[in-house]
Image: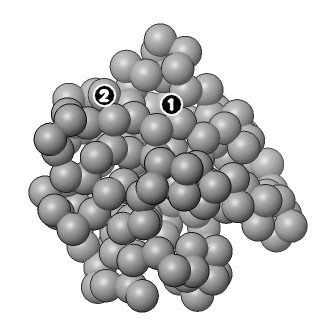
Amino acid sequence: MSNTLKDPEDILFEESIDAILCSVYSNEKPLKGTVAMLDWRLNSLVSQFLKKGHIEGKKGEVVFIPFTKEARPKGLMLLGLGLKEDTVLPTEKKVLLDQLRARLVKLKMTRIAISVSSFDLKEEELEKAFKNFQITWIN
């Protein structure tokens, strides 16, 4: 099940979401796109995680950045895609999304917001990967 598109800034105040999903590249500095907008609104929280080495952006890396205990959404889930110029094959995309899905299931987070542009996939592909999740799209 999916909902309409939301602005990245608005998604931070959406109480019906457990986690925000974005990707990050190992060599994209400064950050760009949705993750950059979220980083700005979160007072450089993502950038701080990058600087401290908690996130590297390596292909397949999955990192959850929690917000405050009472917050909704609960945090930001980042998927590392490796080098920006490297092509991610369709079979690799499936494996990467399966890793992300497994982490969400482990954390019992089923209401997610996905930045479509961040994953370079069609909504249909993401809906298939996150079947049985309640999805809100970030534009």
Is residue 123 left or right of 84 when viewed as pictured?
A: left
Residue 11 x/y as whole percent: 22, 61
* Front residue of this view, candidates 87 and 122: 122
Q: Which mark is residue 45?
A: 2
Is residue 128 left or right of 70 when viewed as pictured?
A: right
Q: Which mark is residue 29?
A: 1
C-alpha separation, residue under disc 2 versus residue under disc 1 = 14 Å
Position of 57 relative to 35 (above/below): above
Circle 1 crowding by C-alpha within 10 Å: few under 14, some 14–19, many from 20: few
On the question of residue 25 being in view, the answer is no
Nearer the camera: disc 2 or disc 1: 2
Task: Give the amino acid at mark 2.
Answer: Leu
Is residue 39 left or right of 11 when viewed as pictured?
A: right
* Count of residue discs: 2
Task: Give the amino acid at mark 1.
Answer: Lys
In the picture, which quadrant includes the N terminus?
Answer: bottom left
Residue 43 x/y as whole percent: 20, 29
- Which residue is at 20% across, 33% downward? 68
Residue 37 x/y as whole percent: 29, 47
Kindly indicate the quadrant of the structure image that contains residue 58: top right
Residue 88 x/y as whole percent: 79, 58
Q: Which mark is residue 40?
A: none
* Front residue of this view, candidates 127 and 25: 127
- Which residue is at 17% across, 63% downward? 14
